[in-house]
Image (spheres, rainbow, N blue to C red):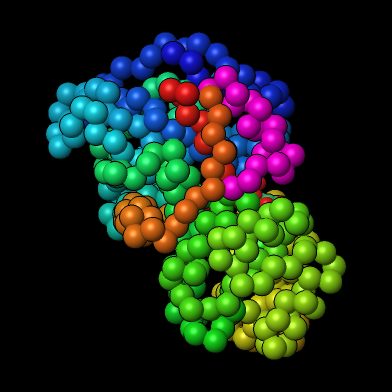
Amino acid sequence: MKAVQYRRVGAAPEVVTVPEPEPGPGEVLLKVTAAGVCHSDIAVMSWPAEQLPFPLPLTLGHEGAGTVAAVGDGVKGLEIGESVAVYGPWGCGTCHLCAQGKENYCLRAEALGIRPPGLGAPGAIAEYLLVDDPRHLVPLGDLDPVRNVPLTDAGLTPYHAIKGALPKLTPGGAAVVIGSGGLGHVGVQLLRALSAVRVIAVDVSEEKLELARTVGAHETVLSDAAAPARIRELTGGLGAQAVFDFVGVPPTVAMATAVAGVEADVAIVGIGGGVAQVQFGVTAYDAAVRAPYWGSRAELMEVLDLARTGAVDVHVETYTIDEAPKAYERLHAGEIDGRAVIVPSA
Ligand code: NAD
Ligand code: ZN
Ligand code: ZN
């Protein structure tokens, strides 16, 4: 089968032919219907060999959807041909956090060598994907896999970050979304669906700000040195109740803490290496900073249910498997409008 692999440190992803996997006991084989392209892959592909936590080659793609093609011994409750989305942050399934469905925070995954598909295990940008356990599948039903596969990460990650801030997002308040790309443009929609706050989107690109307005941002601000003052002004001098940084580079992390209001929640989601400074008398009183990762199994179900209400419309650009390297190039260059999705059958 065709697969898109990261094969050598620093090299561009390549389309290769690999053996079609077969499901062992307890495993599920999916025929991939759609796979999203995330900026985290670009970060991973920029890491030096000693930082890479898994061996190469690696089939990329940690946002996956497919139809059940075959099941291994002992797998029950799935029908061949059923359309499913893949919950990506695989855990052990039995530790205290996994027991709560928070496999993204599994206490034993690292020790047991359990890695997400596309981030250690063979990923979804291929014709077939092996899933280690049926609990990592959520039925898609009538949801279009191509339009909704980004919800498994570009939806789930902001959803999890926003859910943690919801008690602060009271009417009359404001939330700032930094970076209106794959995650950010979904984040804006989730904020609109889950709260009554004013949503202020920030990006370096005028096109991305246009996308933010299209999906529901009340205000948009160009990301430059003047942005924090502009955001303060838009919040009546008070700052925002929550800030979601979907970039995470030093200037955006500095902006995130600078525009946080009293008791605000600041979530650094982007993995751009920025370090948040919290200082008495400088940071707003009682503002809290956290760095969340992906989301829980229950939250993926909630995001998909929210999509069923029509509240979330992911903007997607579609590519064939052969075009996947081009999708990565365009993502790297900041040229994707919303999320790039690889459609193997196209
Ligand atoms: P993306 O490339 O689709 O979007 C990034 C957006 O940020 C673009 O619109 C870009 O124009 C904008 N941007 C770049 N520099 C900026 C700046 N200085 N100020 C404001 N905006 C700026 O990327 P994505 O796939 O949405 O991923 C976003 C980030 O989140 C990445 O760092 C990714 O690795 C990370 N991520 C983290 C998690 C997690 O669980 N913590 C999960 C998924 C992705
Ligand atoms: Zn991702
Ligand atoms: Zn666990």
Residue 178 position by quadrant: bottom right
Comparing 171 with 20, the one in front is: 171
Residue at the image position 67 percent from the left and 58 percent from the top: 210
Residue at the image position 47 percent from the left and 29 percent from the top: 343
Residue at the image position 72 percent from the left and 44 percent from the top: 334
How far from the left and from the top, in percent, is residue 324?
59, 26
How far from the left and from the top, in percent, is residue 342?
51, 31
Residue 322 colored magenta? Answer: yes
How far from the left and from the top, in percent, is residue 320?
53, 24
Q: Give the range drawn in magenta.
A: 321-338
Question: Can residue 173 be seen in this snapshot?
Answer: yes
Residue 7 left/right relative to 146: right
Residue 11 position by quadrant: top right
In the rendered image of this protein, does residue 84 appear above or below residue 178? above
Quadrant where the N terminus lies?
Answer: top left
Residue 154 left/right relative to 25: right
Residue at the image position 52 percent from the left and 56 percent from the top: 186
In the rendered image of this protein, does residue 312 appear above or below residue 70? below
Residue 215 position by quadrant: bottom right
Residue 221 colored magenta? Answer: no
